[in-house]
Amino acid sequence: MKVEQVMARNIETCRADDSLDQVAQIMWEHDCGVVPVVVAGDGAARVVGMLTDRDLCMASYTQGRALKDIPVGSVVTQRVCSCRPSDTIAVALKVMKTNQLHRLPVVDQENRLVGLVSLADLAREAASERGVKRAQITDADIGVTVEAISAPRAAGTLVASA
């Protein structure tokens, strides 16, 4: 099974010059915990970072400022791990495990955003495949990934992509 079969499409994004309160509003209105940071180019959005709900909280706490006063560019995680729509689910799980990530942007060959795949998307797929003789993804696969994501993070272990 390919990532494109389970990924979410039409993902809300932000830019580095947006403020964190704009991102918080996107997260609230679209019930999501991550927003890709993009730059426009050639009519398409290229992913240059990822911003999580935790990033917002920690930025506000550590800087002692309101979200409206903090630009996305000052806190965004700029090292982006991603996968391609044509990658298998196993590849996405490997990137998630290796980098302790719950969500991955799905990008084309030019790093243009085409979707987002989350551990929740993969867990739903595993649930739908229960009892299937040759399941593409299993509850055990999800469990191993959750265990890896939840392990204490070792410094310097980020891998850009599979």
Image (cartoon, rainbow, N blue to C red):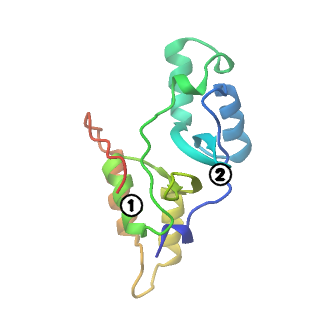
Residue at image mark 2: 11
Q: Name the residue: 64% across, 26% down.
A: 17
> Gap in Å between the C-alphas at discs 1 and 2?
20 Å
Q: Is residue 138 left or right of residue 74?
A: left
Q: Quadrant of the C terminus?
A: bottom left
Residue 82 in the image: above or below residue 142: above
Residue furthest bottom in the image: 133
Residue at image mark 1: 93
Residue furthest front in the image: 42
Location of residue 83 (image quadrant): bottom left
Identify residue type, mark 2. Answer: Ile
Sequence-wise first label, 1 or 2: 2
Q: Sort mark 2 into few (<14), some (14-19) or many (20+) by Cα contacts within 10 Å.
A: some
Q: Name the residue: 61% across, 22% down.
A: 71
Per the rendering, the mark at residue 63 is none
Residue 130 in the image: above or below residue 42: below
Q: Name the residue: 44% across, 43% down.
A: 80
Identify residue type, mark 1. Answer: Leu
